Image: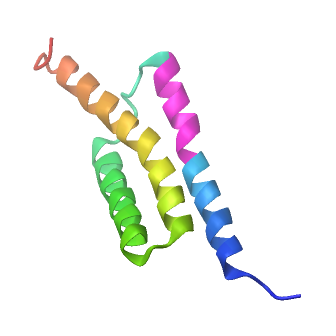
Amino acid sequence: MTFDIVIVGYIAGICTALAQFPQALKVIKTGETQSISIGMYSIMTLGIFFWFLYGVLLSNIPMMLANGVCLVPSVYILFITVRNLLKAKKLLV
């Protein structure tokens, strides 16, 4: 029996991708993003995008899948956070 390292990639990817969804669901339900750090989510979303791109460049399926899935809730949370921030500052109607 041999150990397939790709399984580690899939497990890591699933955990990372799923970690975003509880926060995204909370934002969808409540619309509240006041306690979310715009700086942290901006940097994290950019990092996820680059991990996805890195996976594409390497043709690494686990990396592409995990980060592609992870990007969806991360971009959504970032978008709503920015929108709420602009609304609070009366820059967006």
Which residues fall within the magenta stretch?
Answer: 19-29
Q: Position of residue 70 (x, y in %)?
A: 48, 49
Looking at this view, is 23 or 76 the one in front?
76
Determine the residue located farthest toward the bottom in the rendered image.
Answer: 2
At a point 30% along the width and 33% down the height, the residue shown is 79
Q: Residue at x 47, y 57 (%)?
A: 67
25 relative to 46, above or below: above
Q: Which of the two residues, 50 or 38, is positioned nearer the viewer here? A: 50
Q: Is residue 22 left or right of residue 72?
A: right
Q: Is residue 15 magenta?
A: no
Relative depth, front residue between 28 and 40: 28
- In the image, is residue 68 above or below residue 93? below
Residue at the image position 39 percent from the left and 58 percent from the top: 48
Image quadrant in which you'd find residue 5: bottom right
In percent of width and height, residue 77 lies at 39, 35
Q: Residue at x 50, y 72 (%)?
A: 60
Query: Can see residue 36?
Result: no
Quadrant of the frame with the C terminus: top left
Q: Position of residue 6 (x, y in %)?
A: 65, 76
Q: Is residue 26 magenta?
A: yes
The quadrant in which the N terminus is found is: bottom right
